[in-house]
Amino acid sequence: MGEIKYTKDHEYIRVEGDVAVVGISDYAQSQLGDVVFVELPKLGKALSKGDEAAVVESVKAASEVYAPVSGEVTEINSGLEAQPGAINEDPEGTGWFMKVKLADPSELAGLMNEADYKAYLASIH
Amino acid sequence: MLNRQGRPTTPGEAAPSDHKTFTGNKALSQIEPLIFETGRLETTGVDYEAPKSFTSRLGGFERKSEIGLPGLSEPEAMRHYVRLSQKNYGIDTGLFPLGSCTMKHNPRVNEKIARMPGFSDVHPLQPVSTVQGALEVMHTLSHWLLELTGMDAVALSPKAGAHGELCGMMAIKAAIAAKGEAATRNVVLVPDSAHGTNPATAALIHFVVKPVPVREDGTVDPAVVASLAGPDTAAIMLTNPNTCGLFEKDVVAIADAIHAAGGYFYADGANFNAIVGKARPGDLGVDAMHINLHKTFSTPHGGGGPGAGPVVLSELLAPFAPVPFVRHTDDGMQLVESVDEAANHGAHAFGRMTAFHGQMGMYVRALSYMLSHGADGLRQASEDAVLNANYVRACLADLMSLPYGNRPCMHEVLFDDAWLKDTGVTTLDFAKAMIDEGYHPMTVYFPLVVHGAMLIEPTESESRASLDLFIATLRDLAMAVKRGETERFTGAPYHAPVRRMDETRAARSPVLKYTPPQPILQAAE
């Protein structure tokens, strides 16, 4: 498994070669509560860093998921539409959202690694 | 001397509440099955003869099997709905502290006036000469709404707050188009603390929504607004007081920043009850604002509605107000019903929001409320609403946590869940435990900018005694949390007709259609 990085909006990105797996962090799913609906981007969609990439709705609220990096959507986890609970059960595993072909790998440098993200979570509480 | 056998008659001596009954009912509180379970397919309440000569023109679309509707006699149908209504909780039952909803008492004098035949039996297609009184009510209501808001025109017809928002934003869109900027001016700024309907309204008419982060103290910073506003800015949508229950103290600077960029200022009037008679939105730089008659002006809310969301417009937007509107002429009240007719009076109406004039019954009730209170009464209602919210805040601040510090709020007080941290009790659990105590919970998890939000709006309707009991109840619950009595919360409600709903399963796999048990299904086929 490649290195995992996080955004301040609680998305994670795991780089595997020139493709990256994107989802929401365990902290994000715990804050959202039970996820009941997910809207994923269309295959082939070109995302710019910070774009609204997906929508995740829980019993509490609907939230946007932003693209942590720029790139093209090469695969989506369409199983989530029928089983959104996977986001709660295994957010960084079976609960992944989409795979993105990196347009600019240098964008990764601006994201937090796991230790930085843990420190960031501690700082916002 | 009816009690000759020495049965216990003192409360508390009777059987405990977990005493089981044969029917499952608890005294006069009855378990009510679904209407499909009560009804029978072979029965109907009213038996019409089949029409003598009837030829179906449905062709292949004709229903081939029974529709499977339950048949009930009239008393059965009556009992079903009355029993359901007895499970309802409303402002007529008790304190209803939903934040940003202004669940105030609906005075009975309003109902009496609204039931006068001259108001209740009019038809929107009646000749104008026969409904002069009704039109005068609309005209007088318009006058007082403009007086209280300091604005120039009003569109009475929108049927709810969100409909009013749409109307106001359409007026803004029309004004932008009239300036020839429709293609370039399409961004609407919406603070994080806004009502959820605000971004939804903007998006519905193809504006691009840009969020405005709120600052540490929960209010909007005019410098941030100025930095985000530009030649593409159509409007800002701001609620004042905001959903954190705080007055946007820099509202004039925010209005100036938007106007300097060439945009308009839409104010969400949901929280108007805090400032009636104290501040006029027009004086604060607002260009459009809806007023929820069913909040601020005491017309019935929700199921007792319908709602009504008139929109007031500033001088800049007034020409674009939709039809119909009432004009006072030498020949009496005139109803301007078409865009062409409005043009004769120098207006550029963008169209109409409703088929007819809006919620006539609510206009009568709102005007009745205004006239029975008078200007001083309306001001006092707002003062009392703010005082009551601050009383609740002051009495609970030592036990519960306030996200923006213990400082004066407006008509609603916002707590967060910092005080629940590591207790094993969540905001939702706390709200459910309130149901056991006989209270409708406050608004929870809104506004989203505050963690585990609990937003309480007591309104001016509550007496000191009522507030004291509510506060004592919340204090008792809060102390129970602190003592570690988590089961009182995690299992709540224990005493409601149904226990806690599985919201997750209801959302993930909603059952929207009744499926009869198998034998009944076969009988229907």
Image (cartoon, coloured by chain):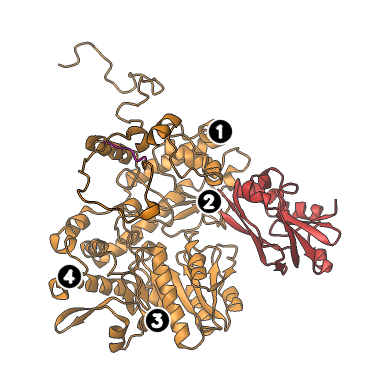
Chain colours: A red, B orange
Label 3 resides on the chain identified as B
Q: Which of marks 3 and 1 is in front?
A: 3
The answer for how far apart the CA atoms under marks 3 and 1 are is 54 Å
Residue that label 1 marks: B486
Chain containing the residue with disc 2: B
The CA distance from mark 2 to mark 4 is 47 Å
Instruction: Tell me the amino acid under the disc marked 2.
Output: Tyr
Q: Position of residue B392 (x, y in %)?
A: 43, 49
Q: Which amino acid does label 1 sit on?
A: Thr
Q: Earlier in the sequence, mark 4 or mark 3?
A: 4
Q: Circle 4 is placed at which residue position? A: B126
Kindly tell me whether residue B510 is visible in this rendering. yes
Residue labelled with disc 3: B317
Above or below — where is B282 with respect to B12? Answer: below
Q: What residue type is labelled 3?
A: Leu
Q: What residue does disc 2 label?
A: B445
**Numbered range of the magenta stretch:** B68-72
Task: Kindly identify which chain the residue marked by label 1 belongs to.
Answer: B
Which mark sits nearer the N-terminus, 2 or 4? 4
Q: Where is residue B217 in the image (x, y as percent from the top left)?
A: 56, 62
> In which image quadrant can residue B300 be found?
bottom left
Does residue B70 show up magenta in the picture?
Answer: yes
Q: Which residue is drawn at 50% across and 61% down?
A: B196
- On the rendered structure, is A47 left or right of B445? right
